[in-house]
Image: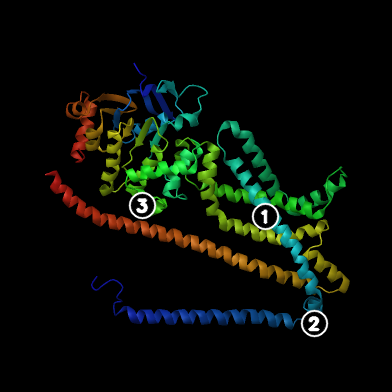
Amino acid sequence: MSGGAGAVPPDLVPRRRRERRYSWRSLAVATVSTIVFFGVLGVIAVNAPGWERVQRTFFDWEAFSAAAPNIVRRFEVNVRLFLIAEVLILAFGLVLAVMRSLPGPVLFPVRLLATLYVDLFRALPGILVIYVLGFGIPGLRLEGVPNDPFLWGVIALTLVYSAYVSEVYRAGIESIHPSQTAAARSLGLSQLQAMRFVVVPQAVRRVIPPLLNDFIGLQKDTVLVSFIGVVEIFRQSQIRSTATFNFTPYLVTALVFLVVTIPLARFTDWLVSRERNRRYAASVKRSGDVARRGRALGGLIGRRGKDDR
Amino acid sequence: MTAAALLVEDLWKSFGDLDVLRGIDLAMDEHEIVCVIGASGSGKSTLLRCINLTEPIDAGRIVVEGEEITAEGVDVDRIRRRIGIVFQSYNLFPHMSVLDNVTLGPRQVLRRKRPEAEDQATELLERFGLIEKRDDYPDRLSGGQQQRVAIVRALAMDPDLLLLDEVTSALDPELIAEVLNVIRDLAAQGMTMLIATHEMGFARDIANRIAFVDEGRILEQGPPEQLFVEPREPRTRQFLQRIIEAGRL
């Protein structure tokens, strides 16, 4: 190749112009096809015989603006539930994952216990766990056991989601090469110390994106505690809806979740792609180093040849 | 007579049907440097891993400074902190800086205070020309630098015995010398070392004794000038011949 690095050969210039033209064209095509697709769907819906009734019951602006403030305010309950449960899930899920990852025959009961737990709570529909804890335990009328449905909602969601999150952690732990543990153990660190200082910190970093994914699920599942009597955003819109014979309040709830969840989903995607780029850049850097070493090597071999004689 | 630094007696180890070690006997004095040579797959690495108690052994016994480390009920972690091992693939902790890599063992195992551990680590890094890499992460280091850090990490535990498992095999040729120089330096300080290596020239320079491992046994051992020049066993001669033909001696 002639010419300095970075100089564009002249025959590349028209090609780049052509490529740019293509990318504009595909953007235009995508825009038009999207407009046509949703436009057709919209026209079908609006011209349907029952549209006017649907519009009145689901998209009533007056009902919307009247219901919105109360409903949005109730979202605070969901946020509180989410934040408390999330912290507990992150901790308990990690404990479960470490329990399942400890080696050795002596620790078999520990592994068995953790495995049974994860199997059980991944198999049960979350709503059943919420019902059993929220109605069942207060129903026992035990002395000193609280009846607060919010509390039981937090506990139920923690139990269910810890099972999922522990599997995410475990995948991360298993992705760390065993030579890392071997190196830690060779220094005299115990198995648990090796986990704590060497394996888990690396594993957690790797599983942040899938963990965020589970957070999104949890965010939405906070509405399930409405079934045991917690008045949160969904329950509030239900109350409003039955009082006014109109479904529009649910639309408020839907919009609140869209506004909160979509940015988190985009953020997760961004994290994943940043991680991928970073790894790619690291591998490119490494192969660059090899090439540089290769050149250095050429010089060294020449010298070494002389030395040997 | 003082106890030998290392005594291996009739050591057997198999992986499934494959007998990797078939009755190894080896004794080392303090300050002695023994190089283990032999073809790939002859059992050199397995021997080192057994001595470090990384691999459970099938039969035989291993004694370090008079204490049988393969006895029932011995605290494995306590033994490991006395025996340093450096791996072919460095195995540095990628999420820790060089300094944290070196101080992890002293702080968590020897329970040293952070400033004390860092002072000692800094001193070692300085001695081996790595001081300016102190706060870097391993992926910023060349292979040779990483391997030198791995050696420093093992040294920070003040081991009685250092095991080096083909520490230059993963390195590009021009980086080998810097690592071998570190080992020479350790030899001059009197560190007791058991070294598995393919670097015959280096082994000849540094070792007090060479042990040739073939099919899971130490077939022949002796001072380098004897073993390299007039080996007794035909298998040893054959092995050395191949090495010479490959231009590595």
* Residue topped by disc 3: B132
Residue mark closest to the camera, 2 vs 1:
1
* Residue B26 point in image, percent of width and height: 33, 23
- Answer with the quarter of the image where residue A215 lies: bottom right
Task: Tell me, yes or no, if residue B244 can be seen here.
Answer: yes
Asked if residue B180 lies left or right of residue A221, the reply is left
* Residue topped by disc 1: A86
Q: As displayed, is residue A114 above or below residue A61?
A: above
* Residue topped by disc 2: A52
Asked if residue A287 lies left or right of residue A126, the reply is left
In front here: A101 or B233? Answer: A101
Q: Amino acid at mark 1?
A: Glu
Residue mark closest to the camera, 3 vs 1:
3
Residue furthest top as drawn: B1
Q: Secondary structure at mark 2?
A: helix
Whole-Å distance between the Cαs marked 3 and 2? 75 Å
Whole-Å distance between the Cαs marked 3 and 1? 42 Å
Dot 2, crowdedness within 10 Å: few (<14), some or many (≥20)?
A: few
Dot 3, crowdedness within 10 Å: few (<14), some or many (≥20)?
A: few
